[in-house]
Structures are given as C-alpha cells and as structure tokens.
C-alpha cells in the first residue's frame, strides 16, 4: 500500500475536525455574546439563531471525514461480526461506493445552490441580510472533504489497508 495514503486520510480528517472545531467555538462565542448583550445591555445581535443553525449543520458535515477515518460511523456490527474478513472487505467496499455515490449526488446539487446564490446575490431574510453562498459554500467544502475521505478510504481498501473500524487492526497506522 502506498505510504502517502494514510497521511492523506489523516490530513483530510484533521482538516474537517479543525473546521468543525472552529465552527463550534464560533457558535459558543456568539451565544455568549448574545447572552451578554441581552443581560447587560438589553439588546441583541438579531442573527444568533441564523448563524448558529448554519454552524451546527457545518460542524456535523465537517466532522464526518474524521469520523470516517476512525471507523466511528454507525456500522452494522451484528452483520459484520458474523462474516469473514473477505466478506467484510466486500461489504466495506460496497458501503464506500454507495457513500461516494450519495455524496457526489449531494455535492452536485450543493454546487448548483452555491452557484445560484452567488449569481443572484441571494441573502437571508434576517436583519443582516447574510449572503447565502457563504454557508452553502462551507457546506459544499465539507461535502468535498467527505468525498475525498471516502475516495481515499476506497483506494486504501483496494490496496489492502486494514478494514474500517476493525478492532483487530488499527484503522490508521500509528
């Protein structure tokens, strides 16, 4: 198996985790700011619900590449524990291919949304009139990271990389 594959998987997972962490820190910060403004000054940002809702969606999608790299996605352990390693590799391969197809489909439509929002100059219906291409673009970036991770894991599986979430072999080489 090529030595560059594990670092690529770690980089994509780490990048997604870093973005998820930044969005989470941003959400908590704006919530604290909102609490401070309301209690101390009797005013509001008027956009906290909008920004936090986009950040929650982004956090979820950005955390997916890391969860995939660690084998932390919900799995059918009842089935996988009863089949041999060869059948597990086939099932993992089918699952990865299905995931690639689903996320490629989602990415296509996410791109169309970003493109349309950019061309039309669409904004949110809030006081700030936030450009919609920004949260849509972040979601598209997260989806692209998931696609890259699924691709790298698929290539790794084809090249003999340990199985996803296999307790007997480490998912990522230390």
Image: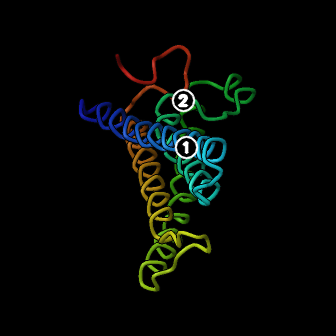
At horizontal 66% and vertical 42% (from top left) the residue drawn is 39
Q: Is residue 113 above or below residue 144?
A: below
Rendering quarter of residue 149: top left
Which mark is in front, 1 or 2? 1
Query: Where's residue 95, x and y in %?
Result: 59, 45
Q: Gap between marks 1 and 2, in whole Å?
A: 36 Å
Q: Is residue 103 above or below residue 90?
A: below
Count of numbered badges drawn on the protein = 2
At horizontal 55% and vertical 43% (from top left) the residue drawn is 33
Binning the other alpha carbons within 10 Å of mark 1 as few (below 14), some (14 to 19) or many (20 upward) gives some
Q: Is residue 153 left or right of residue 44?
A: left
Q: Which residue is mark 2?
A: 71
Residue at the left extreme, as displayed: 3
Q: Which residue is mark 1?
A: 33
**Local SS, label 2:** loop
Query: Where's residue 27, x and y in %?
Result: 55, 44
Q: Nearer the viewer, residue 156 or 6?
A: 6
Quadrant showing the C terminus:
top left
Residue at the front extreme, as displayed: 41
Residue at the bottom extreme, as displayed: 120
Residue at the top extreme, as displayed: 168
**Local SS, label 1:** helix
Numbered label attached to residue 172: none
């Amino acid at each position: 198996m090529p030595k560059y594959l594990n670092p690529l998987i770690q980089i994509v997972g780490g990048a997604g985790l870093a973005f998820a962490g930044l969005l989470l820190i941003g959400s908590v910060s704006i919530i604290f700011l909102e609490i401070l403004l309301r209690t101390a000054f009797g005013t509001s940002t008027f956009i906290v619900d909008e920004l936090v809702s986009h950040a929650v969606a982004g956090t979820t999608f950005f955390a997916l590449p890391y969860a995939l790299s660690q084998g932390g996605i919900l799995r059918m352990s009842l089935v996988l524990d009863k089949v041999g390693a060869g059948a597990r590799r086939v099932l993992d391969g089918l699952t990865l291919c299905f995931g690639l197809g689903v996320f490629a489909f989602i990415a296509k439509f996410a791109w169309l949304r970003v493109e349309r929002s950019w061309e039309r100059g669409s904004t949110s219906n809030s006081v700030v009139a936030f450009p919609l291409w920004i949260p849509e673009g972040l979601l598209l970036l997260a989806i692209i990271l998931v696609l890259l991770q699924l691709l790298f894991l698929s290539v790794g599986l084809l090249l003999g990389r340990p199985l996803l979430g296999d307790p007997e072999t480490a998912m990522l080489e230390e």
